[in-house]
Image: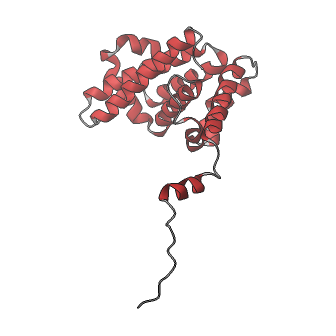
Amino acid sequence: MPEQRPHHRPVPKQAAFFDEQSDGPDPSLVTEAAERAAALLVRGARGSEDAAVTERLVHLADDEGIETIAALWAHAAADTLSGCLWRLYLLRSWVYADPAAAARQFEAGRSRAELARVVAGVADPPGPDALRAMIDQVLRGIAEGDFADVLFRAAAFSRVVAAGRATLADVPDGEVRRMLATAEQLEAAGHLELAGRLG
């Protein structure tokens, strides 16, 4: 008869999973820190008269990397300050990464979203340089203007781009929907900011 080995109960996979995760940062603390950082950027910058602060805000994604910003704010809800900042910096990163495509899509949407085109405030014609200048000016508004205006201008820009994408055969429908959702989220956040209810 073969020798009997003592039987050990296997460790449940769930227990092992939670043991592995227990050393990581508490997600609620990470979220709280991300929101606090966003509030300091948005609310604190407005009180500053220092032009260098404004330029640091504009170039935050360049200096820190969009990946760092994503790690902080990418999963934040659209109706929070951190969620708004994520969408603003993502738009800027896209315009800088592919200004020719951004200009082409904006141009294609101008006649389909006239009011949004005016609110966005892009120079005519909307070439790559004009779009880069516009998106930087929008971000300067975080420190120099009203945050609701920043959100409404970014929403208008996104709406024109979404309208343009819808007319272009080489842009997938998912990209149209994604940009339209960004426009709607930023616009809704702008209304919350006006009402004093944006985190």
The image shows residue 195, relative to residue 46, as above or below, that is above
The residue lying at 40 percent from left, 15 percent from top is 117
Q: Is residue 180 something one can see in this rendering?
A: yes
x and y percentages locating residue 93 in the rendered image = 51, 36
Which quadrant holds the N terminus? Answer: bottom left
Residue at the limit of the structure toward the left, as seen here: 169
Which quadrant holds the C terminus? Answer: top right
The residue lying at 76 percent from left, 22 percent from top is 50
Q: Is residue 123 something one can see in this rendering?
A: no
Q: Is residue 171 left or right of residue 24?
A: left
Q: Is residue 109 left or right of residue 34?
A: left
The residue lying at 43 percent from left, 26 percent from top is 182
In-front residue for pair 17/118: 17
x and y percentages locating residue 128 in the rendered image = 45, 31
In-front residue for pair 160/191: 191
x and y percentages locating residue 68 in the rendered image = 60, 43
Q: Is residue 7 left or right of residue 21?
A: left
x and y percentages locating residue 149 in the rendered image = 55, 13
In-front residue for pair 98/159: 159
The residue lying at 51 percent from left, 36 percent from top is 75
The image shows residue 57, relative to residue 199, as above or below, that is below
Residue at the limit of the structure toward the front, as seen here: 1
